[in-house]
Image (tube, rainbow, N blue to C red):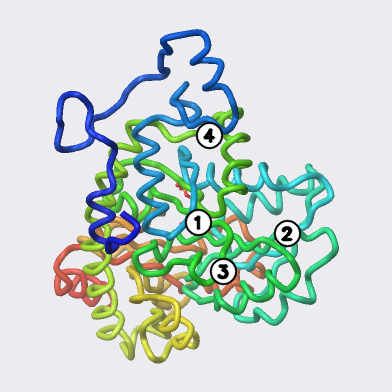
Amino acid sequence: MKDKHFETQAVRAQLERTEYNEHSTPLFLTSSFVFDTANDLRAAFNDESDDFIYSRYVNPNTNEFIEKVCLLEGAEAGFATASGMAAVFTTFMALLKSGDHVVSCSSVFGATHAVFTKYFPKWNISYSYFDTGKVQEIESLIKPETKFIYLETPTNPAIELIDLEAVAAIAKKHNLLLIVDNCFATPYLQQPVKFGADLVIHSATKYMDGQGRVLGGIVVGKKELIHDIYLFGRLTGPSMSPFNAWVLSKSLETLALRMDRHCENALYIAKELEGNDKLENVSYPFLPSHPHYAIAKKQMKAGGGILTVTVKGGYEGATRFLDKLNMIKISPNLGDARSIVTHPASSTHCKLSEEERLKVGITPGLIRVSIGLENKEDILNDLLQALK
Ligand SMILES: *Cc1c(COP(=O)(O)O)cnc(C)c1O
């Protein structure tokens, strides 16, 4: 499958057929597996064995999903988890020890930020944030006990971009791991491994499923790192359920098609909204006016499905706009077939102080719009009538 194209891999990477010659992958709802002899079971418990033992470890369905994502990301191995945050947390716990230090971009997903700020101190792990726009800051933050550099690009919710190649070069120079949360871009638009990332994390809940049905997460990358994450995960139980893996593997079959449409719709709407007199700003990676447009063009195939608008009139203006929308609903989610709006200052990032929010570009009037798969004129018209 490695020699095939993305779309083909997403459709055709599948488990071997069973004796029933099924066309589509069956669902293996079984918590455990049986062994013909005592010796077979003993052999399976070797850490290096890939026999199916128990579905907390791996299951045929999670395996299919993992193998597919590895092909799509160009990664060696992976471990699938119950949610995106389980992938983030399992990766941190498997790789870090007391005394370690992490350098991260400042605008990380809200729950990841909470892990850094609320729980890292409890385990004597420290972190430093670099300003998303300033990768040159990273080197001054590195300490002898730094273990990895962590980042998201495009960032949530401010839609800023970080130069993957530049950060990978810094990581390599200082012998650090580079971990990238690639949730916003998906492997269809951006493959961080190609630019030198060691591990790539996804919330599969977002674009990978793309239809708002299941939670899921995955971490893929270097084999020896994944092996450590897998051994920690199979003991502590953050594993993905076979049912969710089955759904997600099907979802991936349409990822390329969906992303093409998300990107087409989002670019069209960003262009139409830019310059609107009710807006202070429109931010989308593939708008030439975006300050990181050159980075977006270098590392992304298209601009993705998320844009932000900054409504005039701050908090009040944003609230009035949100309440006037008809079709588009208010939800903290993103990456769905349905267009969604989120007001980060009052929801996903409400736990941050005003100062912390402004530091990562979250102004009171900022609204994140996850552009869905509806007809682009209908999405635009709803946004325009609410702006009026
Ligand atoms: C949603 C999200 C997560 C967490 O994923 P869950 O599946 O909700 O646990 C992590 N990172 C980013 C960038 C996200 O958008």
Q: Exactly how many numbered labels are in the figure?
A: 4
Instruction: Using the numbered discs, state the Cα–Cα distance from disc 2 to disc 1 in whole angstroms.
Output: 23 Å
Q: Residue 258 has which mark?
A: none
Instruction: Using the numbered discs, state the Cα–Cα distance from disc 3 to disc 4 in whole angstroms.
Output: 27 Å
Crowd class of label 1 (few under 14; some 14 to 19; many from 20; radius 10 Å):
some
Q: Residue at x 59, y 25 (%)?
A: 46
Give how far across and how far down residue 87 sits, in percent. 53, 45
Q: Amino acid at mark 4?
A: Pro
Mark 1 sits on what residue? 348
Q: Residue at x 49, y 15 (%)?
A: 40
Q: Amino acid at mark 2?
A: Val
Q: Is residue 114 left or right of residue 364?
A: right
Crowd class of label 2 (few under 14; some 14 to 19; many from 20; radius 10 Å):
many
Q: Residue 102 has which mark?
A: 2
Mark 4 sits on what residue? 238
Looking at this view, is 271 or 133 the one in front? 133
- Callout in the foreground (3, 1): 3
Mark 3 sits on what residue? 196
- Callout in the foreground (2, 1): 2
Crowd class of label 4 (few under 14; some 14 to 19; many from 20; radius 10 Å):
many
Asked whether mark 3 and ligand 1 are closer than 8 Å, the reply comes as no
Asked whether mark 1 and ligand 1 are closer than 8 Å, the reply comes as no
Q: Relative to 357, is 241 above or below?
A: above
Looking at this view, is 261 or 159 the one in front? 261
